[in-house]
Every structure is written in C-alpha cells, then in structure tokens.
Image: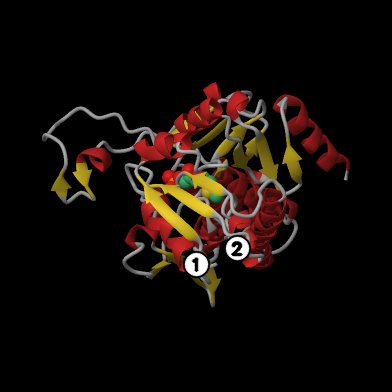
Amino acid sequence: MIDIVPVKYEDGKMLILDQTQLPCAKEYLELKTKEDIWDAIYKLKVRGAPAIGVAAGYGLYHSVKDLEAGSYESFRRQFMEIKEYLASSRPTAVNLFWALDKMEASLIKAKDLSVADIKDVLLKEAELIRQEDEEACKAMGEYGLSLLKPGMGILTHCNAGTIATAKYGTCLAPLYLGHDKGYDFKVFADETRPLLQGARLTAWELNEAGIDTTLICDNMASIVMKNGWVDAVVVGCDRMAANGDGANKIGTSGVAILAHEYGIPFYMFVPTSTIDCNTKSGAEIHIELRNGEEISTLWYIKPMAPEGIKTYNPAFDVTDAKYITAVVTEKGILYPPYEDSIRKLFEQEETK
Ligand code: MRU
C-alpha cells in the first residue's frame, strides 16, 4: 500500500494531498483559512467520504484555533458560523456532517473549561476522528477479506482507497490485506467519469502497491462481467440510509444492477460513520449536482462537446438495498434485510 495520507495536521499546519493533481504529482497543499478548507473539499482536492470527515474535523479546529473570544458563548457563536460554512461545501457524504457534529458535541461537553482548554479538546477530537477512521478501515479490511478468495477477479468503481480515508481505504482495504497474504487478486478499476477517480486514483494506488490492476472505461463493466472475469464487486459509500440504500459515486447503481444480472456478489463497504439512520431511504439523500463543465470540457481546458450543450451532472447515485449482497462495516458484516441489521447494529452500540 502506498505510504501516503490525504490529510495531515502537523505543527499547527493543515496539509492535504491535492488529489486533483494525481497521478501526475504528489503535492501537499497547506490550507490556511476556512475558505481554503471549503474550497479544497468542494473542488475534490480532498475527497472520499471518510477523508472529507477527517478534513472537516481538523478544518473546523484550524479555523477556530486563533479566534479571540472572551467567553464560551462568544466562542460558540463564531464556532457555529464556521461549522455551518464548512457544512455547505458538499451535500452527499454524511461523514462531513457527522464529523462537524462530533466536534460540536465535544465543544458542548467542554463548555465549563477556558476557551484555551476548549481549543485543546477540539484538536484532540479531530485527532480521534482520524484515528478511529484508520482503525475502522483496518477492521473493514479484515471483514472484507473473509468474503474474498485468492485469485478472484474484483471490480471496483470510483476510489474508496487509502487516500479516500484516514488510511487503508474501505473497499480497497481487503485488497491490500489479501495482497500481503499472496491472494493474487485481478482487479478491474472503472475509470469513473467524469472526474476519473478510478483511473487517476484507484488505478494509481493499486498499481503502486503491485496489485494486478486493469483499467476499464465505465461502459466496459458489462463485458468483463460477461467474460466471467469478475467474481465480486467492491465499492465504498457516501451515505447509507436506514433501509440499506447506499449513495456512492455516480455509476455505482448501474454496476450493482449488472452484477445482479450476472449473479456476481456486490459488496458495499460502509463505516458506521457513513450510516445515516435519520435518513429513511435513498430517496431522501441529497445528491450533489455539479458544474456541467466537468462533462463537457476536459479538465476545463479542451472542449469535448459543443459549446453551451445542456448537461446533467449528478455526482452520486443511490444503489437500492436489494442489489447489495452484504454491507461491510468495522463492527461486522451486515446482511439483508438491512432495516433490521442496521437497527440492531446501532442498538448494540448504544447498550455498550
Ligand atoms: O466525489 P468523491 O470523489 O468524493 O466520491 C467518492 C466516492 O464516491 C467514494 O466511493 C466514497 O466516498 C467512499 S470513500 C471510502
């Protein structure tokens, strides 16, 4: 696995790996202001639901650490304004809101401390969000590997790898773990139009790790499945509703429907931070609509379509729970009916 993390907080500096430059350059950007942090999330310089959560935690701390406030109330007011601002950067991945809410909860818990001590508590919370995500990914790698066998052909869509998380990735974690054990997987990476997370990020990550990887265009998933080259599909998730419907990168639902048609298991990797029990079904998930130029212009440089063409550019789609063979979480593997397995998982957590 590549030894590179998407978000670092070192000596009071917030650094992110600029994923828009990959695979050509591995550049860390220093984010100084709340506007820099908002922009980095909006422009997918830092991306992938768990990594967005990690960036939001550090980003909120970084944006409030130099605030001057004579009282808890005045600090809280400014904190909440920045929290709302960062929350407006992208709408679909629930980890953004989950991490910001966790930061707010620790602020409230620390309300009797001095403002200086509250700031220390917030930094610790941001670090915990990062650390717990790393642990969750490791656990998902182990659970996920139990579903796979040596030599399998695996198809994946978008990038749910180490740079989309604190470390290890969600659905790529078992591939790294299996590779270390000599499993010899043959991976097909969908390029993932329009922003090419599969080609630029997944193919790069896996290739660097020495995993046998074949890049395909999105419209080739059907033929590789029909050829019998795919034994399992693994994907990440941006928000899973209480009924098991899962939003992930645009194109995921089509892959799931194909896998169903060809009788191939479809596994969605969903840390509990990505499960949103307040959302009943996929129909309630806010799907981000992005600028049509992402479709019509190659990296905003060269036109790929007639000027002014009408576009529709949803960044995510929802895979219906009925197409998901199993949901891999850090607490274990869930099976249908997901209303029950998700509810039980959270009930168990509450009684701990
Ligand atoms: O628009 P992106 O690149 O942030 O979309 C990322 C995905 O859809 C990932 O599959 C998902 O966030 C899971 S990352 C572990």
The reply to whether residue 126 is visible in this rendering is: no
Q: Is residue 328 left or right of residue 26?
A: right
In the image, residue 128 lies at what x, y percent? 68, 61
Where is residue 6 drawn, in percent x and y? 49, 63
Residue 301 in sight from this viewpoint: yes
Question: Count the marks: how many?
Answer: 2
> Relative to residue 320, is residue 272 depicted above or below?
below
**Neighbours of disc 1 within 10 Å: few (<14), some (14-19), many (20+):** few
The amino acid pointed to by label 2 is His
Is 195 in front, or is 289? 195
Q: Is residue 192 above or below residue 280?
A: below
Regarding mark 1 in the picture, which secondary structure is present there?
Answer: loop
For mark 1, what is the residue?
A: 210
Inspect the image, locate mark 1, and give the three-letter code of the amino acid beneath it: Gly
Q: Are marks 2 and 1 in contact (CB under 8 Å)?
A: yes
In the image, farthest residue toward the right? 351
Q: Which residue is mark 2?
A: 179
Vertical comparison of 348 with 29: above or below? above
Q: Of the two numbered discs 2 and 1 on the same chain, state the one appearing first in sequence.
A: 2
Query: Is the C terminus in the top left, top right, bottom left or bottom right quadrant?
Result: top right
- Distance CA(mark 2)–CA(mark 1): 8 Å
Q: Residue at x 66, y 48 (%)?
A: 148
Q: Is mark 1 within 8 Å of ligand 1?
A: no
**x and y percentages locating residue 106 in the rendered image:** 70, 53
In the image as oriented, which residue stretches furthest toward the bottom? 11
- Residue 55 in the image: state x and y as whole percent: 52, 57
In which quarter of the view is residue 72 placed? bottom right
Query: Which residue occupies 64% across, 64% down?
Result: 127
